[in-house]
Amino acid sequence: MLSSRKSLTSRLPKTGETIHGHKFFIGFGGKGANQCVQAARLGAKTSMVCKVGKDSFGNDYIENLKQNDISTEFTYQTKDAATGTASIIVSNEGQNIIVIVAGANLLLNPEDLREAASAISRAKVMICQLEVTPAASLEALRIAHSSGVKTLFNPAPAIADLDPQFYTLSDVFCCNESEAEILTSLEVSSPSDAGKATLVLMERGCQVVIITLGAEGCVMLSQKEPVPKHIPTENVKAVDTTGAGDSFVGALAFYLAYYPNLSLEEMLKRSNFIAAVSVQAIGTQSSYPYKKDLPLDLF
Ligand code: ADP
């Protein structure tokens, strides 16, 4: 989880320079927490397994999870590292400088996951990403897989030489274009490119592969329907696409858990719709819609 601090400035400062900014925001981010928040806002019962520092950022983060009705029973606090932070400077021209210090995220270890095994094994779906160590993510996937819990793996940020077990332990493997490029070494910039990349990823052992394509929606491939299929999204006026992928993954987890009888294509259409709502407002978690704000036919 990342506590983010964003300053808006007229231009980026040079090395050694101090400048005045004109706006400052404190936000909550990190892929796992964003995904969990989106699923919770749709009505999912959620629990966040992660680690923050024993510091004010960590305390604020735990409060934010609670306000989103997310269980923090397995949100560990450590004295050995600070809460993960993202320090962001954005200029009027939209240029940015971002420094992420992962901090406590990297101290989440396989034993912490084993301690949370009771919660994981009672879940319908477990999502994980790569903002913690691969060892921690793999342990989470193993626990879920061995308990028959559906696994939704989002290999982000992507690493080129991903351990092959990540593919075989993923029921649903969902990444964006740039992550698909890193994982497959193919160029992925169109639905047809994405279709080729899904075939490569599927061969590594996943049951279902989804590649999101921003305004183009997503492409799916499953063992049951082994021909890539493009699912277009809504045509909307995007004002801030930060965190759209996490809104999509959170929504997909919600449908996998609560509407398991829907077709995959229908789940993806609905997840596209929800992520398209999120890009029409500024911010990350602050742009994620609640169930009450969405059309009834999504539920
Ligand atoms: P990431 O945030 O990981 O880069 P994407 O940019 O692929 O992920 O976006 C994830 C999903 O968000 C897309 O599959 C789509 O459903 C939705 N989305 C993103 N950008 C737009 C947009 N400009 N218009 C409509 N939907 C969008």
Image: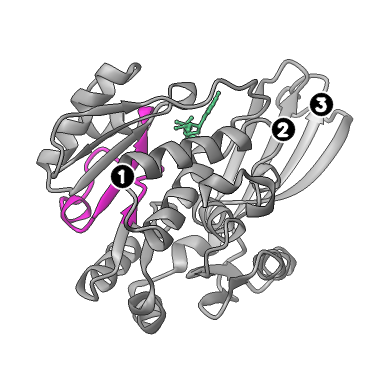
Work out whether mark 3 precedes mark 2 in sequence or the reverse, and give the earlier one.
Answer: 3
**Residue denoted by label 1:** 264
Q: How far apart are marks 1 and 2 (CA)?
A: 39 Å
How would you rate the neighbour count of disc 3 (Cα within 10 Å): few for under 14, some for 14-19, many for 20 or more?
many
Asked if residue 133 is among those painted magenta in the image, a careful observer would answer no
Work out whether mark 3 precedes mark 1 in sequence or the reverse, and give the earlier one.
Answer: 3
Q: Which amino acid does label 1 sit on?
A: Leu
Residue drawn at point x = 53 percent, y = 59 percent: 36
Residue 74, position as x, y percentages in the image: 51, 78
Q: What residue type is labelled 2?
A: Ile
Looking at the rendering, the stretch of residues picked out in magenta corresponds to 152-178
Disc 1: residue Cβ within 8 A of ligand 1's nearest atom: no
**In the depicted structure, whether residue 197 falls above or below residue 47:** above
**Could you say which is closer to the camera, residue 161 or residue 173?**
173
Q: Given this view, does label 1 or label 2 mark the residue nearer the observer?
A: 1
Left or right: where 108 falls relative to 18: left
**Residue denoted by label 3:** 9
Residue 287, position as x, y percentages in the image: 68, 42
Work out whether mark 1 precedes mark 2 in sequence or the reverse, and give the earlier one.
Answer: 2
Asked if residue 165 is among those painted magenta in the image, a careful observer would answer yes
**In the depicted structure, whether residue 268 falls above or below residue 292:** above
In the rendered image, which quarter contains the N terminus?
bottom right
Residue 213, position as x, y percentages in the image: 41, 26
**Residue denoted by label 2:** 89
How would you rate the neighbour count of disc 1 (Cα within 10 Å): few for under 14, some for 14-19, many for 20 or more?
some
